[in-house]
Image (cartoon, rainbow, N blue to C red):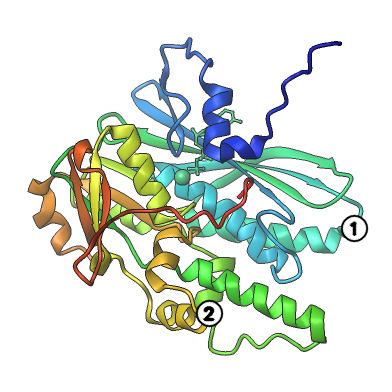
Amino acid sequence: MPEQEKRTDVNELGEFGLIEHLTKKVKMQQKSTVRGIGDDAAVIKNGEFLTVVSTDMLVEGIHFDLMYTPLKHLGYKSVVVNLSDIYAMNAIPKQITMSIALSNRFSVEALDELYDGIREACANYNVDLVGGDTTSSPKGLYISVTAIGQGEVGKIAYRNTAKIGDLICITGNVGAAYLGLQILEREKRIYLETGAQPNLEGQDYLIERQLRPEARKDMIELFAKNQLIPTSMIDVSDGVASEIFHICNQSGVGAYIEESGVPIHPNAQEMALKFKLDPITCALSGGEDYELIFTIHPNDLEKVKYLPDIYIMGEIVSPDDGIKLYTKGGNIVPLKAQGWKHFGN
Ligand code: ADP
Ligand code: MG
């Protein structure tokens, strides 16, 4: 009997496990490759500057649902989430390329809306759309964006350079985008079951955080103005807990996060309770907030204390101390990235 070929389901590895598996034998050959796989963006030496490159793909049915996502917002978001990865390196995005694959379900008018959003994001963030690719798909819409930015030697903020004693900061509230998604999903279910029109009244803030996020260009500019160079940085795409794990694992350190230091918007707090969800779980595991998590040397505390929109959440500690959450109730528990995302998210 022929030997059974081994077949491993990709879900056994999960997204990060799969990337690790696929890329562990990849070798960098060019001296100009300063940082390859493993950060928010790759870093490439380019004369006296560093070129920073990041790419992301959005798939209909996995990353967006056109039942409640206006195409203009989708175009805007697809650009912004890529720019966020460039800012997360403490670099400035300059250009993007945009590739789309679409089925014949999409009209020219629909694609015009998508491009209205893309152009608006390019204008707001001062980046140029310089190319891309257009092709057909058997079903659904696929959007792939590559962002190219410029960084300065000595100022790039990696994920693997946090040091024991550094303070862990975040640029804004988290959990709102996840709760915005819960509202949209609930209204979709009600509409499909009863035909009732969605009731989104009073939920603009949460829905906007989900459908039309912004990247923290302003914070990177503030860092430059105040001569602050984070010791490490990452943007919140998958969720605070997951991003803290990336920084800690790559830097070989532990961390503690103060529950009371994690900013949650009052609307998010209220909506979490309505959904019978724990607000701090939404904040730590929700994702898609596109805030920046960064660490600073304690000597730089004076610099951040007076900057708007910076919240200190915790501290980098020895790896032996693990990655812990100090709860409001005074308990110390392991920080967990809740597994409510399926592979592909
Ligand atoms: P982010 O959430 O910041 O976009 P990802 O988790 O998507 O980052 O990616 C982590 C790292 O793995 C990045 O350096 C990315 O370029 C790299 N990467 C992801 N998928 C692949 C792949 N299929 N082949 C090579 N590198 C990949
Ligand atoms: Mg990122």
Image quadrant of residue 264? bottom left
Query: Would you say the beta carbon of the disc 1 residue lies within 8 angstroms of ligand 1?
Result: no
Element at label 1:
loop
Which residue does the image show at 59% across and 72% down from the upper left?
Answer: 182
Q: Is residue 230 visible?
A: no
Q: In the rendered structure, find residue 275 and report the number of the disc placed on it.
A: 2
Q: Nearer the viewer, residue 331 or 152?
A: 331
Outermost residue, right side:
104
Which residue does the image show at 70% across and 38% down from the upper left?
Answer: 132
Q: Amino acid at mark 2?
A: Phe
Q: CA distance from mark 1 to mark 2?
A: 34 Å
Q: Amino acid at mark 1?
A: Arg
Left or right: where does residue 28 sit relative to residue 193?
Answer: left
Which residue does the image show at 48% across and 55% down from the upper left?
Answer: 125
Q: Is residue 291 visible?
A: yes
Which residue does the image show at 24% across and 37% down from the upper left?
Answer: 253
Left or right: where does residue 94 sit relative to residue 300?
Answer: right
Where residue 204 sits: x, y (%)?
54, 81
Element at label 2:
loop
Q: Residues within 10 Å of mark 1 (few under 14, many from 20)?
A: few
Q: Residues within 10 Å of mark 2 (few under 14, many from 20)?
A: few
Q: Which residue is mark 1?
A: 105
Q: Mark 1–mark 2 contact, CB under 8 Å? A: no
Where residue 269 sits: x, y (%)?
40, 79
Q: Earlier in the sequence, mark 1 or mark 2?
A: 1
